[in-house]
Image (tube, rainbow, N blue to C red):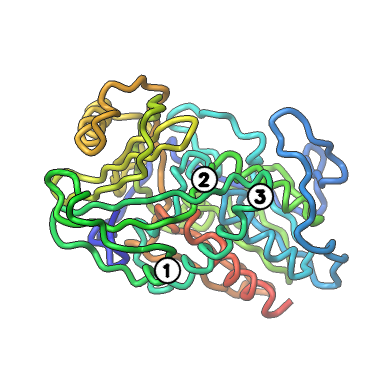
Amino acid sequence: MPALSTPHSRQHKSHKPSHSAGNGVGSTSLSFPAGSEIRSAAEQPPKGGFVPLLPRLQPPVQPSPMPPILVLGAGVTGLSTAIRLRQAGASVRVVAAVRPSEHPRAHAPGTWPPYPASLRAAAVWYPYHVSDPRVERWAAATLHELHRLVDEPGAGVSIVPFVELFRGAPAEYAWSAAVRRFSAVPADRLPAGFASGWEMEVPFVDAPVYMRWLERRFLDLGGMIETRFVGSMGEVDMPGGVVVNCTGLGARRLLDDADVYPCRGQVVRVRAPAVRAWTVSDDPAAGLTYVFARGHDVMLGGTAEDGVWDETVDPAAIDALRKRAAALVPATADAEVLEVAAGLRPQWRGGRVRVEREERPGGGAVVHSYGHGGSGFTLSWGCADDVARLALAAT
């Protein structure tokens, strides 16, 4: 994985999606026509596969006199933002085509549910494939919140020992001061062929568990979720109100934003119970390699392919990353394969993140939060704090 200055956050070219790369989120009409599905925690008892209602982290939020705020998207960015807005007292409705708790475990190649990046992510805290100058602040705020959530039942957050290895001199990171136990790997513990490394303790997020927890937390705070599809901002009816756009790659179609493009990542899940490593190497010559022992499986990765919309797995790329992973952690060489997968990281303007407020003709505003690249979980709470302030600025 690259440094914050990241040579891998290349200047992007114009990328044209395939016909199968469309995306959308739920419709936002406040009249809620027949067929919409709106549920709150009080209306929906837990059922199979759901995280049960959680004890409140704070007193219930009282009904708000402020105008309602609509959040488009139910990925890690959208739900974190919705929680922050609700905690501030706003009336918040999340709109998405699918809820995290109801998302299928896998989806057919070429389709694009609104948050496969969140559900497929390896989800270890680490700023990756993003070069925005605000990253250090956002990442530090998220790190603080994830450390707090380690003790929250059902959140799926734990602390892991993380090692990054380099063939030459180590990358320097502005965010290292915020990380617990950040230090150089002793020379006698470096694997053959590596000249340096960093070791640190960082949060790991079990993505499906955490996404369900975010959903239940938002509902428990009195938020509402509407499951509908929105194909363009022209379908959003919020006169004078605020819409928060957390649609990731969907922003390309939703806003006709040609600066949005994907970075494809490919991974292999294997069964290797003896492996305990949380190790990464981003060798400019060999490519990105990581081995993450998540407990129930080991994630081997990866790739960073800017501008590739195809979510079909490339067998040659999978074979190559398996060989790199075996060279890094030999115990993975003959591990049983559980799954191979590809997903798309949402990029914007060569590594920047779009977090800004845009006033709408006739009143109201859209606050954008998309383009987090490979750092959606890592930046989630820091971005949510900024977006909430922007959304509430004139309500």
2 or 1: tag closer to the N-terminus: 2
Res. 28 visible in picture = yes
Q: Position of residue 342 (x, y in %)?
A: 38, 35
Name the spot of residue 80 as percent of width and height, x first: 62, 58
Alpha-carbon span between mark 1 and mark 3:
22 Å
Q: Which residue is mark 2?
A: 118
Which residue, given by chain and number where applicable, does mark 1 sit on? 135
Of all residues shown, which one is farthest toward the front? Answer: 188
Identify the residue at image location x=80%, y=48%.
32
Pointer 3 or 2: first along the chain = 2
State the quadrant of the C terminus: bottom right
SS label for mark 1: helix
Q: Toward the viewer: 336 or 262?
A: 336
Q: Tell me if residue 204 comes above or below residue 257 in the rendering.
A: above
Residue 72 in which image quadrant: bottom right
List the residue tagged with mark 3.
214
